[in-house]
Image (cartoon, rainbow, N blue to C red):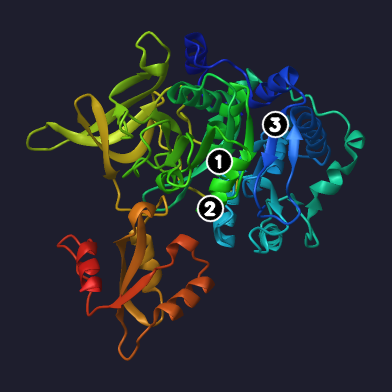
Amino acid sequence: MILTSEQRAETYVASGVWSNVTLVELLRRTAAAAPETIAFEDVGVGAVPGLSATYSFAEAEKRINGLAAFFAAVGLRPDMVLGIHLPPCADAAIIMFAALKAGLVVAPLPIYWTKSEIEASIEAASIKAMVTGSEIESEPSGELVRDVAADTFAIRFVFAVGDGQPDGLIDLSEVLADLDALGEPPEVARRGEAADHIALLSMARTPDDELLIVPYSHNQLMAIATGHLIEAGIVAPETVLSTMHPASLASVAGSIATALMSGGHVAFHHGTSLAGLAEAVESVNADRIVLPEVIVAPLADCIDRSLAFSAVGVGLGLAPAPAARTVDLLTLGGLCLIPRARDAAGGTVALPAGAAHLGGLSAAPILFEAKIKSKATARSRKADGGELLLGGALIPDAPWPEPQSGRRSALLGVTSDGFLRTGLATEEHDGHLMITGTLGETIGVAGITISPKRLDALFSRHPSVEDAAVFPIEAGPVGHRLGLAVVPKSGERPSLTELLIWLEGEEAGKLDRPAALVSVSEIPRNADGTVRREALFLSAVA
């Protein structure tokens, strides 16, 4: 499926920032140059029982080709979407490349998502098959995904990896046990350039907490990796350690494609502690680690040698980082992945107003453009800031089609000239764009923006609650924790434990759970009805 206009694609190719090389072709070229070197490896204790592997490029290609043939044989056709519900691991990379080889589109299903969140993504992204682990972090992920499929008519297949799989799943280990019997991978006939077709769906959320599907072509993913190489100053093969979801933008473009373009390889680690992460860095002698920005500074304190960091963050209130060799991978809430090198002191570098050229050289190709959709006041008609718009070779420029079921979902906002509407409030200062927040009211929890209005309505439905509102509690580098204020009904005294148990029945997300509860006589509101959340916080700590 091609979503970028032919005119824009031709412009990007002519500039040199798009090369019409697919991710699959990138892997093939790297494998041809050094077939016996390591391509993907697992490091540290795995999160899935029995799942730990190291694959050379030759071994990876053989498994990818066989699995691509299997996907085609069972009836998965080009442009169908495969949801990947796995932690960072080498087998997830094999599965992803096999899906792309068969012409499929991959989509990340975060392992912390609840059943209802997975079901919503199936609907919004038109997912037709899923792959999971037998267990993930001792949680019955295989049973969870199997139950989701049983309740969702759209899912045709559920594949799984790891030991001790429950009944009803297709064991990919058994499928790959006899690679020679799987035959040759399919020849996928595509309209236009193969690299213009969508390869990956990123998951984001609107300010109102609606799920937003963001489509990326091979060319856009490769452009991100190119920008990462330039911003990071990578000039030699690197061993990149990835801690991110294996089908996320940060893993596919920021880790895998970046490592392959450098001539290096990727090690995967499911980090659950700083000590384990530091040990993983040393065990593979990593040159670079791709990880959430909030972990960069604490990890740097645990490492005695020089290590390059690629810090994945939303771009709002960036965490401190070491002065040397740190690159921000700005997701802006999951909408994109923009590489930006930190300055000499380790400080963040704001987006430039206008065109951003490769390596900052004005004669180099344009990687992306940033501008403000101004909002002028009625009195002065003078622009005082507005919404951040992004365009260019590494920015998604068209929405994913709405579900065929007819149910409406949030659609990616794109202007007629291909600029992405981010929903972020921005001001221009000295030629740079400063992001001041979101246009709608949000609270950042663990790097994810959530809608307080949605949570207000959720907790107000509790049978013992007359009115409710959430408020942010500062939690250092991890962002915020949620506080909850309730007005109890007469004679009721709901406890935090009771509310958390009730949330299980409401199938609330893991980030929706409050860390503190306070009872109040009324929810303080402004004249326009908006909640005064700071006042709630002050009453909670009084």
Residue 211 point in image, percent of width and height = 48, 49
Return the residue nearer the eye: 521 or 301: 301
- Of residues 259 and 445, the one nearer the viewer is 259
What residue did someone put label 2 on? 275
Camera-nearest label, 3 or 2: 2
Do labels 3 and 1 touch, CB within 8 Å?
no
Return the x and y of residue 111 as percentages of the image width and height: 59, 54
Where's residue 368, x and y in %? Answer: 40, 23
Q: Earlier in the sequence, mark 3 or mark 2?
A: 3
- Which residue does the numbered mark 1 point to in the structure image? 248
Disc 3 residue type (three-letter): Ala
Residue 77 visible in this rendered orientation of the protein: no
Disc 2 secondary structure class: helix
Residue 39's disc is 3
**Going 36% across and 13% down the picture, which residue do you hit?**
361
Front-most of residues 69 and 31: 31
Asked whether the beta carbons under mark 2 and mark 1 sit within 8 Å of each other, the answer is: no
Tell me the kind of residue under disc 2. Ala
Tell me which label, 3 or 1, sits earlier in the chain: 3
Image position of 103 (left or right of 121): right
Q: Residue at x 81, y 31 (%)?
A: 62
Tell me where residue 79 sits by quadrant: top right
Tell me the quarter of the picture where residue 133 sits: bottom right
Q: How many marks?
A: 3
- Tell me whether the residue at label 3 lies in contact with that at label 2, contact meaning CB atoms closer than 8 angstroms: no
Left or right, residue 59 beside residue 280: right
Q: Is residue 173 above or below residue 222?
A: below
> Which one is earlier in the sequence, the residue at label 2 or at label 1?
1
- The answer to whether any part of residue 402 appears in the image is yes
Q: Secondary structure at mark 3?
A: strand
Q: Quadrant of the N terminus?
A: top right
